[in-house]
């Protein structure tokens, strides 16, 4: 008999983002006693929090939506090829309402601790308000980019204007006209914000530590007729996503980089530069990711594009990355980004030349001078992928903390299980397929697999499931081996666990955060594991009667 001090559920899902929404849908359909615990006051995860101007998909909208319901696909009209945050949040709320999922979600609840009880094989959760919950299975729908990080600068609290991380951009309308605005950071987020606000602010100063390779998003509206055509092709669209490494509609060019002439390569690149979305990254030659010479040639092609678009040659050169080649970090997609620097009200400060020294009462100080601002925007990124796990006191068998286990980087079995943490399941965990692909496509795969797994467990009356050490070691080594083949391994980015603002993540040691084998290989592998009766996972225990 389970000794309960709070409410007991068969499954607790942490996080009401894309993963949590779909996971609870599957569980509710099975009639499982399950709940979603969400720290924010609404559902939507990334799309609930990131309300900065310019926040939008880089995935084609119709490849980002859920695929599980024909009715949903038929009734939803995406208004743009790369839909913006307000519509994305409306969509996720629509899904929750349509399938009556909201009543299975608890908002404003932050899970502070999750401890595994080895006697009863359950998880005990402590919520920030002091409540305790217990569950047999703990499913992590934690965001991969949900813990924003700020620079560690002296004087940050002294600034008298408004300052915030892009993740905390105010929900109410913020008037930027006539304001002097600073944006620190030129990652995917900074590049979206800068392109969007450049012509809406009084003056914009961009503080860039390292430039990023970026290319046009080529967004556009979707008419009724176009949407009807997309609806008719949904099966084909999702089939394409399922067979491409990134889970997108973009298929890599199968020709060998060196087998075609320079003219043919340039002709492809000219076409890709005009093609919407990640085509420039993912429909390119595969050598771009692995071969230094091929990467350098393509990077120079993009550098030339930057020079053509930015009028001041000195500024253009500052916007061209020197420390890494195109595509070895996450490629930000831009709209009017480079043109922003042609405006009289936009200035670029190269922190490589004049580093930030401190925040003052009125703005920012670099090694060269003081700047005054009304608003400082920190577009400085996230404690990515493992950060949300680190923020919860997760303890497995023998009191082992996940924080300690993962202090040098994650280790998992399939990105789904962690040895030492029984009954903890991650449909979109570090080193899983969804962490490196078009998220919702990977998430649907992960949630479906995990739900099938749980059905298997319930059908057999197992109460304790745990990956073996051996299975975890083999998977983690496999993930590391794939990094070894990629130029990405040398890049300072969240793909390798780099973040200068997070102790322990500042320099050097690579963390194998994502699975780089591509969606089809990942799906093939996890399906094989299932077909082999869940190879690598110890299934144990007899049913325990739970009193209510
Ligand atoms: P990113 O891609 O991690 O970018 C963060 C940016 O902030 C990047 O330009 C950093 O420069 C810069 N940064 C970070 N810390 C500092 C400090 N201390 N001083 C100056 N500049 C700093 O995060 P994003 O939010 O843009 O994108 C994250 C993902 O969200 C993205 O990939 C999408 O999938 C959605 P650096 O390059 O490290 O020198």
Image (cartoon, rainbow, N blue to C red):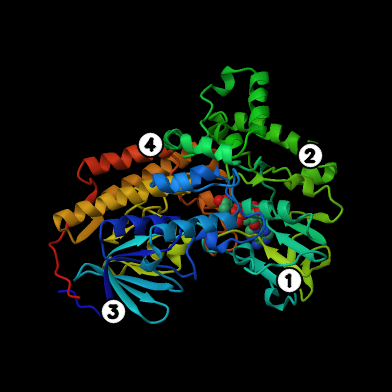
First in residue order: circle 3 vs circle 4: 3
First in residue order: circle 1 vs circle 2: 2
Residue picked out by circle 2: 309
**CA–CA distance between discs 3 and 2?**
61 Å
Residue 226's spot in the image, x, y percent?
57, 37
Taking 46 as reference, is 226 above or below it? Answer: above
Residue picked out by circle 1: 359
- The quadrant where residue 349 appears: bottom right
In terms of secondary structure, where does tag 4 sit? Answer: helix
First in residue order: circle 4 vs circle 1: 1
**CA–CA distance between discs 3 and 1?**
46 Å
Direction from residue 445 to residue 88 in the image, left or right: right
Q: Residue at x 69, y 64 (%)?
A: 377
Q: In which quadrant of this rendering is ligand 1 seen?
A: bottom right
Residue picked out by circle 4: 521
First in residue order: circle 3 vs circle 1: 3
**CA–CA distance between discs 4 and 2?**
39 Å
């Amino acid at each position: 008999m389970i000794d309960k001090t709070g409410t007991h559920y068969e499954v607790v899902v942490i996080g009401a983002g894309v993963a949590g929404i779909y996971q609870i849908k599957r569980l509710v359909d099975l009639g499982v006693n399950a709940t979603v615990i969400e720290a924010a006051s609404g559902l939507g995860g990334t799309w609930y929090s990131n309300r900065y101007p310019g926040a939008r998909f880089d995935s084609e909208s119709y490849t980002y939506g859920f695929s599980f319901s024909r009715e949903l696909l038929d009734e939803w009209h995406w208004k743009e090829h790369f839909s913006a945050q307000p519509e994305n949040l409306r969509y996720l709320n629509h899904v929750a309402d349509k399938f009556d999922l909201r009543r299975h979600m608890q908002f404003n609840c932050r899970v502070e601790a999750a401890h595994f009880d080895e006697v009863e094989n359950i998880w005990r959760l402590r919520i920030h308000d002091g409540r305790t919950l217990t569950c047999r299975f703990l499913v992590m729908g934690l965001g991969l980019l949900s813990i924003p990080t700020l620079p560690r600068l002296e004087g940050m609290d002294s600034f008298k204007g408004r300052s915030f991380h892009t993740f905390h951009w105010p929900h109410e309308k913020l008037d930027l006209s006539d304001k002097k605005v600073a944006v620190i950071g030129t990652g995917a987020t900074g590049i979206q914000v800068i392109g969007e606000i450049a012509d809406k602010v009084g003056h914009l100063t961009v503080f860039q530590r390292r430039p990023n390779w970026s290319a046009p998003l080529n967004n556009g509206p979707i008419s009724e007729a176009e949407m009807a055509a997309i609806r008719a092709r949904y099966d084909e669209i999702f089939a394409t996503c399922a067979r491409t490494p990134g889970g997108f509609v973009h298929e890599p060019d199968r020709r060998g980089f060196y087998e075609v002439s320079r003219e043919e390569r340039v002709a492809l690149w000219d076409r890709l530069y005009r093609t919407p979305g990640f085509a420039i990254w993912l429909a390119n030659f595969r050598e771009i990711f692995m071969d230094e010479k091929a990467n350098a040639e393509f990077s120079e092609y993009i550098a030339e594009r930057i020079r053509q678009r930015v009028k001041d040659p000195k500024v253009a050169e500052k916007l061209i990355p020197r420390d890494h080649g195109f595509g070895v970090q996450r490629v930000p997609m831009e709209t009017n980004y480079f043109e922003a620097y042609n405006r009289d009200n936009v200035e670029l400060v190269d922190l490589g030349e004049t580093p930030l020294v401190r925040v003052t009462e009125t703005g920012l100080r670099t090694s060269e001078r003081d700047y005054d601002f009304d608003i400082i925007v920190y577009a400085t990124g996230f404690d990515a992928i493992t950060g949300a796990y680190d923020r919860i006191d997760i303890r497995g068998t023998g009191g082992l903390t996940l924080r300690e286990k993962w202090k040098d980087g994650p280790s998992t079995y399939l990105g789904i299980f962690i040895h030492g943490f029984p009954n903890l399941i991650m449909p979109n965990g570090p080193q899983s397929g969804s962490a490196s692909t078009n998220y919702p496509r990977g998430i649907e795969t992960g949630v479906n697999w995990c739900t099938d797994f749980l059905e298997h467990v319930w059908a057999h009356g197992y109460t304790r499931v745990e990956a073996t050490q051996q299975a975890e070691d083999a998977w983690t080594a496999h993930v590391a081996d794939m990094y070894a083949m990629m130029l990405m391994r040398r890049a300072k980015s969240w793909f390798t666990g780099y973040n200068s603002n997070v102790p322990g993540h500042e320099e050097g040691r690579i963390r194998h955060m994502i699975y780089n084998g591509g969606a089809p290989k990942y799906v093939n592998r996890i399906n094989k594991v299932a077909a082999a009766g869940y190879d690598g996972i110890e299934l144990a225990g007899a049913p325990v009667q739970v009193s209510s």
